Image (cartoon, rainbow, N blue to C red):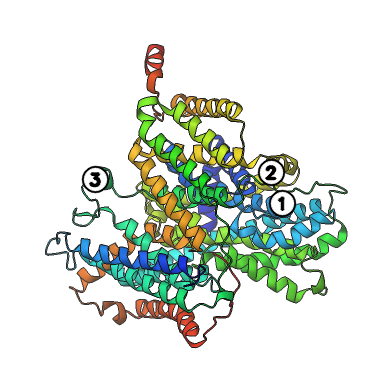
Amino acid sequence: METLTLLAQGFAVALTPDNLIWSIIGVTLGTAIGVLPGIGPATTVAILMPLTVGLPPVSAFIMFAGIYYGAQYGGSTTSILLNTPGEAGSMMTAVDGNAMARRGRGAQALATAAIGSFVAGTIGTIGLTFAAPLLVEIALKLTAPDYFALMVLSLATVTTMLSNPTGGGSIAFGIASLFFGLLLGTVGLDPQTGQARFAFGVPELLDGIDTVVVAVGLFAIGETLYMAATDGGKADSMHKLRGSFWMSREDWSRSWKPWLRGALIGFPIGAIPAGGSEIPTVLSYTLEKKLSKKPEEFGLGAIEGVAGPEAANNASAAGALSPLLALGLPTSSTAAVMLAAFQQYGLRPGPLLFESNSSLIWGLIASLYIGNVFLLVLNLPMVGVWVRLLSLPKPWLYGGILVLSSLGVYSLNGNAVDLVILWIIGMVGFVMRVIGVPIVPCVLGLILGPLIEQQLRRSLAISQGDWTVFVTHPVSAFLLLVALAFVATPIISSLRKPKPQSAVGMTR
Amino acid sequence: MSAHRLPGTLFGSAVAALGVAVVVASQQIKTGFTYDVVGPAMFSNLIGIGLVLSGIASVINARRASLEDLPDQPKLNLWPVGLISAALLLEAALISRLGWIPVVATVFVAGTYAFGDRRILSNALIGLVLATVILLVFTLGLGIDLPLGPLEPLFQNDQ
C-alpha cells in the first residue's frame, strides 16, 4: 500500500502543467524519431542532454522516458509502411506488418500495434511500479563485490546476446567493442586519485570523453556515414493506407492474447540485461507462430505477428527502467544514456535515490502512465501525421541528423575539440558498422566502465588487496560464474564445431 | 588470403595493437595513495589485456570462418564519407571564427549532397534557415550560447 501512496504523490508531480507539457514534448519527439530511420531514442536523449541542463531533473527525465516509450510506438509505423524498421525493436514487426500493408491492411496493422503498445506499455508500467521497490530491497543487501559482479554479468550477457553468431567475427567482435568502450571510459582524470590517464597532455581530454560525444558519434554519425556509403539517396517505396481503418471483430479476437503474452515476455526480458528490445520481440514472434492455428499465415500478414512483438517491445522499455532506477544498472543503450543523464545532474539511481528523491522517481513512473495515454492518441487518430513524416527525403533527413549531432555535441562545452572527437568516433562507428561489430557493448562499456572500476577498487580496498573477495561472497561468486558461462559457451561451441551454426539468427 | 577474411583480420590486428599500446601507456600512469590498494593503472592494464585477447580471437575467427559463413561485404562508396568528414572537420576548425550559422549550413549542404541531392543553392537556403532557427531558439529561448561569429555585435546592441 505504501507503493500506491508514493505513486499518488508521483501523479501530483507528473500532473503539474509544466511536467505534462514536457511529457507531451517527449512522447511526440519519441514517436517522430521512432518513425524516422537513422536516429533512435539513445541518440536523441544524448543530443538533448546538454540542452536540458537548465530544466529541473524531474521534467528532463519525464521527457527522456517519453522519448523512450514514444520511440517504441513510432518504430512500428516505419516497419509496417516501409519495410525498413525505424527502430531495432520493430524488426520483427516489419515481417508481417509490411505484408499486411501490401495486402491493403496497413491501417489494421498500425491499429493493433498502437493498441497493443498501449496495453503492454501500461502492464509494463504497472510491473515497474511494483518491481522497482522490490529491487530496491534487494539492492540494499548488495555489497561492493556483488555490485561489481552484477555489472560484469550485465556486460557479459549484453555482449553475448548482441554478437552475431553467423557474422564470422562472432563474440570476439562484441568483446573487442566492449573493451574499447571501457577504454574510452578511463580517459581523463581518475576519480579516485586524480591521476591523468590517456589524456596525452590534451587539456580537453582531462575531463574525459563525454558519453554524448561517443553515443552521438557511434550511433548517429556512424550510421549516417554508413548509409551514405551504401545506398545513398535511394528512396524507399511506401505503401499507401487504404480501405477501412477499423479493426474487425476477428482482428480484435486475434490480437488481445498476443498483446498480453507480448507484455509478459517483454517486461522481464527488458529488466534483465539482454540488450534491449530486440530479443523479446523475436521471442514473442516465435511464440505466436508456434501457438497460432494458422502458422502458414506468418510472413504473409498474420496480425498476431504484429500484435505480439509490438506489445513486447513496449513492455521491455518499462522493464529496462526497473533495474535502471532501482540498481543503477542499464540493460539497453537508451537506459545507459539515461544513466549518464542522471550523472549529469549529480544523481545516482539506486536505493538512495528512492529515499532522498522519491518525488523524482515516482513522478517519473507516474508520467509513464500518462505518456502511454498521450501515445495512444498520437498514434491512433493522428497516425496520418506520422505517415507524412515518412516521406521526408533521405538527404534532408541525414543532413538534419548531422546538424542536430553538431548541436548536441558543441553545446556540451562550447568546444570545437569535441567536434573533432565526434568525427573520429563517427569514423570508428562507420568501420564497426561495415565489419559487423556490435556498437551497443561499446556504449555500455563506456558508461558502466567507471562504475565497475569504482566497485572493483572499493572491493579490493575492503579486502586489503585480496582478489578472492569476489569468490568468497556467495552472491558475487554466483553472478561471476553465470557471466563466465555466458561468454564461454559460444566460444567453446564454436571451437568444437568447425562451422558455427546460427544459434539465434540475430544481427547486431 | 580471401578478401572476405581481410576485414576481420585487419580489425582484430588493430584491436590487439591498441591493447598492447594501452598496456605500455598504462606503465606511465602514476600510482595512487596507500589506501588505494591497486591504483589507477590496474584497470587500464586489464582493459589492455582484454583488447589483446579479443583482438587475437577476432583474427583467429576470421581465418577459421568458411566463406559461406561470412556476410557479403556491401559495396562501399567512399566519396560521400570523405565529403561528410571534410564538412565536419571544417566545422570544427571554423565554428568559433565564422559562427554557428554558416558552418552548420555548410554541413547540411554537404550531407544532402553526399546523399545524392544536387540542389546546392536551395539546400544552402534550407541549411541557413535551419541553423538560424536553431540559433534563435537555443540562444534566446534556452540560454545556450552558440557562437555568433561576425554577427556578435548585432546581438550585443540588442541587449
The N terminus of chain A lies in quadrant: bottom right
Judged from this view, the residue extending furthest toward the bottom is A496
Task: Determine contact: label 1, label 3, CB under 8 Å.
Answer: no
- Report which residue position mark 2 lands on: A390
Of discs 3 and 2, which sits in the foreground? 3
Pointers 2 and 1 within a single chain: yes
Whether residue B133 sits left or right of residue A394 in the image: it is: left
- Distance CA(mark 2)–CA(mark 1): 8 Å
Q: Nearer the viewer, residue A115 or B11?
A: B11
- Report which residue position mark 1 lands on: A82
Q: Quadrant of residue A119?
A: bottom right
Q: Amino acid at mark 1?
A: Leu
- Distance CA(mark 1)–CA(mark 3): 46 Å
Q: Is residue B132 above or below residue A135?
A: above
Q: Is residue A459 above or below residue A353?
A: below
Secondary structure beneath label 3: loop
Task: Determine contact: label 3, label 2, CB under 8 Å.
Answer: no
